Amino acid sequence: MPVFVIVVNALVWILPAYVANAAPVVVTKLLRGRIRLHPLDFGRCLPDGRRVFGDNKTIEGFVGGTLAGVTVAAILESFSLHNLPSGIVLSVGALLGDLAGAFVKRRMGMKPGDPAPLLDQLDFLLGAFTFHLLVLGELDTAMAGILLLLTPPIHIATNVFAYAVGLKQHPW
């Protein structure tokens, strides 16, 4: 199979996770100021005095991200390009991975929005891979390898775009 086809297949497969990871930024931007957003950690701190995740990880963002990723998976499934169970697992896994990244950043004393090269670009992807493997018992290692290489520049480009259009406060 040509490399181009493998790359396109990998990107189509991971698209629900990409969308799930990006959607909370849009959801919270649309909702902020209209309703009170609810932090996933309910404002709680661990014994180190630091928040579990921080104010930027909200219930609304998690639900919105999940719904966006699942919607993309359903659309792809309607064209026989994906299957819904895999899309659901990838979407939830991506958001869990993002939460894990936020947790690590808080433990390191980093504030929400502080850059953490590679962690910021790969936490959601590794979460999607891990959750997919745990729940569905499968992961195409060739596609995973390709996506580990492609995702950082894609993530950086989409963050720069989100910053340029006013969705993010920082271009990272």
Image (spheres, rainbow, N blue to C red):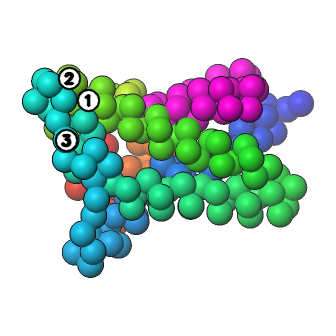
Residue at the spot of label 3? 44
Q: Which residue lies furthest to the left in this view?
A: 49
Query: In terms of sequence position, does the residue under pointer 3 or pointer 2 come before the other?
Result: 3
Answer left or right for 11 relative to 160.
right
Mark 2: amino acid: Met
Residue occupying image coordinates x 80% and y 49%: 83
Mark 1: amino acid: Lys
Residue at the spot of label 2? 108
Query: In terms of sequence position, does the residue under pointer 1 or pointer 3 come before the other?
Result: 3
Q: Is residue 67 above or below residue 143?
A: below
Q: Which residue lies furthest to the bottom in this view?
A: 34
Residue 140 is inside the magenta segment:
yes
Image position, residue 84 (x, y; %): 75, 52
What crowding class fits label 1: few (fewer than 14 Cα within 10 Å), some (14-19), or many (20 or more)? many
Residue 101 is inside the magenta segment:
no
Q: Which of 29 and 116 is in front in this view?
A: 29
Residue occupying image coordinates x 64% and y 42%: 89
Tell me where residue 166 sits by quadrant: bottom left
Image position, residue 85 (x, y; %): 74, 47
SS at badge 1? helix
Q: Is residue 44 visible?
A: yes
Image position, residue 31 (x, y; %): 32, 72
SS at badge 3? loop
Q: Do the residues labelled 1 and 3 touch (CB within 8 Å)?
A: no
What crowding class fits label 3: few (fewer than 14 Cα within 10 Å), some (14-19), or many (20 or more)? some
Q: In the rendering, which numbered label is found on residue 35? A: none
Image position, residue 159 (x, y; %): 38, 50
Q: Are marks 1 and 2 in contact (CB under 8 Å)?
A: yes
Q: What stretch is highlighted in magenta?
A: 121-150
